[in-house]
Amino acid sequence: MAIQVYNTLNRKKEPFKTIEENKVKMYVCGPTVYNYIHIGNARPAVVFDTIRRYLEYRGYDVLYVSNFTDVDDRLIKASIEQGDSVLNIAERFINAYKEDVNALNVREADLHPRATETMPEIIAFIQKLIDKGYAYEAGGDVYFRTRKFQGYGKLSHQSIDELKVGARIDVGEHKEDPLDFTLWKAAKPGEITWESPWGVGRPGWHIECSAMVEKYLGDTIDIHAGGQDLTFPHHENEIAQSEALHDDMMANYWLHNGYIKINNEKMSKSIGNVILVHELVKKYDPNVVRFFIQTVHYRHPINFNDELLSSAEQAYDRLRTTYYNLLHRLQHSADLLETDERNAWMETIKGLKDRFIAEMDDDFNTANGISVLFDASREANKLLQDKNSSKEILEAYLALLDELTGVLGLSLAKQEELLDEDIENLISQREDARKTRRFDVADQIRDDLKDKGIVLEDTPQGVRWKRV
RNA sequence: GGCGGCAUAGCCAAGUGGUAAGGCACGGGUCUGCAAAACCCUUAUCCCCCGGUUCGAAUCCGGGUGCCGCCUCCA
């Protein structure tokens, strides 16, 4: 059974078929870099990074391109407010973006093109649209002739006459039709500009993606993705530009992730409930944040608040505990014997892996993939209760957990930690006390260590400790 | 007005025709010197409401209620 992908274009799941065998060309709309990113920006980064990782896991060679919009109205505004250049501000927040998504274990794209570095291609793209009659210059601006493009509205499933109701012409615009959108914007005095056949100016928002996709990936790509809000008008306009020019599909699959809400409200600056990734990862382990995002299907809305994050933290710790306990057993057990049930265990492990793949194949259902991780955890915990467990099977469970969490971009492994010598001493003093049944002494030491954030757990294979 | 989404246990969340995954929290039991961790059991006769199709629906159709998104360069 092939991977099934929900395609916004047709509003249904379809078998995933690539243009070139085993190769995926994927483009994800990136941020406008005028500020630190919030969790609304983080979601697509995490979601499509996960999809990329999964496709690679399934044997595809993925070429992943994601842009930075480094010139637009908001950047110009920020530039004026901060008295700094557009390019400096962009540079600063590109670095901040990379730092933030890196914390969430989002891999860098193969290519991160910037609008300002794609200017010749953007201008050439616009010129070709003019030559083909799909665009026109007016007063130094260039507009796309929306009505001329057959099929406008096919992604957002709206008819052009309905769209017309909301469209309007702003003061200073020179559109033939309210539905037309800007490809090139004439500069106002003092703004950052580029030379073009239509005078100095800068590109409209939508054109950079069309130009970049063409430049780096080709006329038709496999996957084009972004947040749900980009469906209209951004992606609709990209389709119009690219398909008008190429007379071919821009992308075979359009994927859109759902919105984020804060305490069931829309996250917005006016409400003042915007959560920056920056701040969030100080408060919660980035693994937990990533995990939390993945516990909800990517197309569904996701609600953020402290209670939900804390619950996710508890859940994630369950997986971690299993992982640590497997490691502890492996390292501290002298009784690693072959069990009679070796084949049964290996079958179970194989079954878990197969289930994980089946769930993820179904439109990247990470919520169900994660439920398999919990089942794996339960099975591994059962193994840990056996008196005789073999090294091979313990290692197989660790490998399974590493493999599946790795696909999701999560890590259960903790950093190598050492205890202070005096704490080591206390632990061994307690062991002595327990051996001589001086339990009051032993319990006192355990309580003291707990106050210092070290929890002790006695197992048949010796004492186990963890920090809390 | 147009287009679309969602409504599943105390909370979160899968499931889109075959009789309710998983997690958090709660309760009982086992294990333990006591704990912790873990395991087992229990926890929605039922999936917003009403009607219909079907041998059979949380899942399909019609109607209703509630919440939300896009149609404003906001992911």
Image: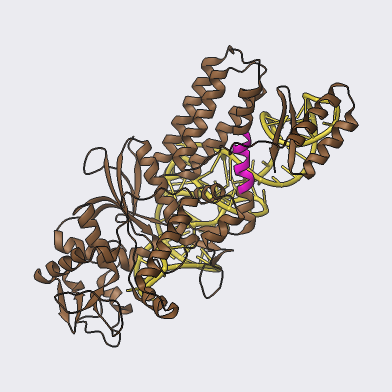
Chain colours: A brown, B yellow
Q: Residue at x 67, y 23 (%)?
A: A385
Q: For residue A160, which quarter of the picture?
A: bottom left
Q: Visible in this render: residue A42?
A: yes
Range of magenta residues: A313-322
Give coordinates of residue A140: x percent, y percent. 19, 82
- Please identify the quadrant where the C terminus of chain A is shown: top right
Q: Residue at x 39, y 41 (%)?
A: A54
- Please identify the quadrant where the N terminus of chain A is shown: top left
A323, B56: nearer the viewer: A323
Give coordinates of residue A325: x percent, y percent. 64, 30
Q: Visible in this render: residue A157?
A: no
Give coordinates of residue B71: x percent, y percent. 35, 73
Q: Magenta: predominant secondary structure element?
A: helix
Side of A77 relative to A146 (left or right)? right
Q: For residue A423, which quarter of the picture?
A: top right
Side of A57 relative to A443 (left or right)? left
Q: Residue furthest front?
A: A421
Residue A108 in the image: above or below residue A72? above
> Within the magenta stretch, is there residue A202?
no
Side of B36 relative to A273 (left or right)? right
> Within the magenta stretch, is there residue A320?
yes
Residue A55 in the image: above or below residue A207? above
Give coordinates of residue A24: x percent, y percent. 28, 44
Q: Residue furthest bottom?
A: A171
Residue A136 in the image: above or below residue B47? below
